[in-house]
Image (spheres, grey):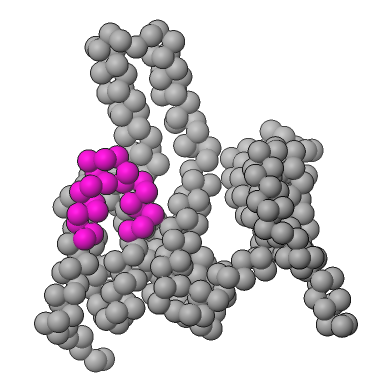
């Protein structure tokens, strides 16, 4: 096994990246934008990999995790650490050869391992699951905010009651939707990392430019349809599982249906103005969003772009 030796120039470059990371972490902590920062936490690892190689990326991963552990509390460390691990997972993605979907699969795999280890440590040290600790932390935050609002004597009774309702509903919401929330974090963090990689790798940028070709996984489409039918005939059975499957499926297949719509707008050479109007209307219309979700589901199963391609090949 070849030993990894870092040169003086590379070390300076890595320290520069770590300095920017520490500044961003500090600014995020004092401004309240740490959730946004955590989505971008994998950037230092990917930059080190692109500029210096795999050995430096591994060293940067360890350094970022240690620095985060020093600067934030354990719960934020787990959340930001998830972003770092997603960045490290994408080190193994070969953007020129593999599909974009492979990048998301690697990120989900790395994130699952990270959260699994974090949950195991939480159970061993605190005798509580990671989800329980997060819920208790949110409850403590709500209690502190409520006490401060009550002491200021400038907030109305209705505002204090609204905060109390949020405090009561948060545990149920997190318990019911934690899988979907975790998926959304992984999705946006991975997407941000892919956009960063597009600056370094032309094949990745080319794949991003073909976003109109995006189709959701056929297996998830079948699972989402099954979840709809299950909820229709057995509404009280498996509520947690069905809720998360439908939330994840609806999100992905809305994007898939949106991509299909714009594929045909481009194929038929409609103007960008019509595309802008349709985008605005889609996001404002609840019933049309549901139609687009169904279109995305059936597109994943049957590939409706085939008609446009067949006509083009026939010419």
Q: Nearer the viewer, residue 86 or 238?
A: 86
> Is 80 rendered above or below residue 149?
below
Using the image as rendered, state which of residue 292 and residue 221 is in the foreground: 292
Quadrant for the C terminus in the image: bottom right
Q: Is residue 155 above or below residue 306?
A: above
Furthest-left residue in this view: 8
Q: Is residue 127 visible?
A: no
Residue 42 appears left or right of 227:
left
- Frontmost residue, 39 versus 246: 39
Identify the image quadrant of residue 146: top left
Q: Which residue occupies 45% across, 66% down?
A: 195
Instruction: From the top left corner, tell me how far across and down residue 164 is, in percent.
Output: 41, 18
Residue 69, image x, y percentages = 20, 53
Specify start and end residues of the magenta stretch as a single range.
Answer: 20-41
Indicate whether residue 109 is drawn in magenta: no
Predominant secondary structure in magenta? helix
Q: Which residue is painted at 43% across and 58% down in the image?
A: 189
Place residue 159 in its image quadrant. top left
Position of 107 with respect to 33 (left or right) is: right
Residue at image position (50%, 33%) is: 173
x and y percentages locating residue 301 in the rendered image? 77, 63
Q: Name the residue at 23% across, 47% down.
A: 27
Horizontal arrangement in the rendering, residue 261 relative to residue 214 (left or right): right
Q: Is residue 308 visible?
A: yes
């Amino acid at each position: 096994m070849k030993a990894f030796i870092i040169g003086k120039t590379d070390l300076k470059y890595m320290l520069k990246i770590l300095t920017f990371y520490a500044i961003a972490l500090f600014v995020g902590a004092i401004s309240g934008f740490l959730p946004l920062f955590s989505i971008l936490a994998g950037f230092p690892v990917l930059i080190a990999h692109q500029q210096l190689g795999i050995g430096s990326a591994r060293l940067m991963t360890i350094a970022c995790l240690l620095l985060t552990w020093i600067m934030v509390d354990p719960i934020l460390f787990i959340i930001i650490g998830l972003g770092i691990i997603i960045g490290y997972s994408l080190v193994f993605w070969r953007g020129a050869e593999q599909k974009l979907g492979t990048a998301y699969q690697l990120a989900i795999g790395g994130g699952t391992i990270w959260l699994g280890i974090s949950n195991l440590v939480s159970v061993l040290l605190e005798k509580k699951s990671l989800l329980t600790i997060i819920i208790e932390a949110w409850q403590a935050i709500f209690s502190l905010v409520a006490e401060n609002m009550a002491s200021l004597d400038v907030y109305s009774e209705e505002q204090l009651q609204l905060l109390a309702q949020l405090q009561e509903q948060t545990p149920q919401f997190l318990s019911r939707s934690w899988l979907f929330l975790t998926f959304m974090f992984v999705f946006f963090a991975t997407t941000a990392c892919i956009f960063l990689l597009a600056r370094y790798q032309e094949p990745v940028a080319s794949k991003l430019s073909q976003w109109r070709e995006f189709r959701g996984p056929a297996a998830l489409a079948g699972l989402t349809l099954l979840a709809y039918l299950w909820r229709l005939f057995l509404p009280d059975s498996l509520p947690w599982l069905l809720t998360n499957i439908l939330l994840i499926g609806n999100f992905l297949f809305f994007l898939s249906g949106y991509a299909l719509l714009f594929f045909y707008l481009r194929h038929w050479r409609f103007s960008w103005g019509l595309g802008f109007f349709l985008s605005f209307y889609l996001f404002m219309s609840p019933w049309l969003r549901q139609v687009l979700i169904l279109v995305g589901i059936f597109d994943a199963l049957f590939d409706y772009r085939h008609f446009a391609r067949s006509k083009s090949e026939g010419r």
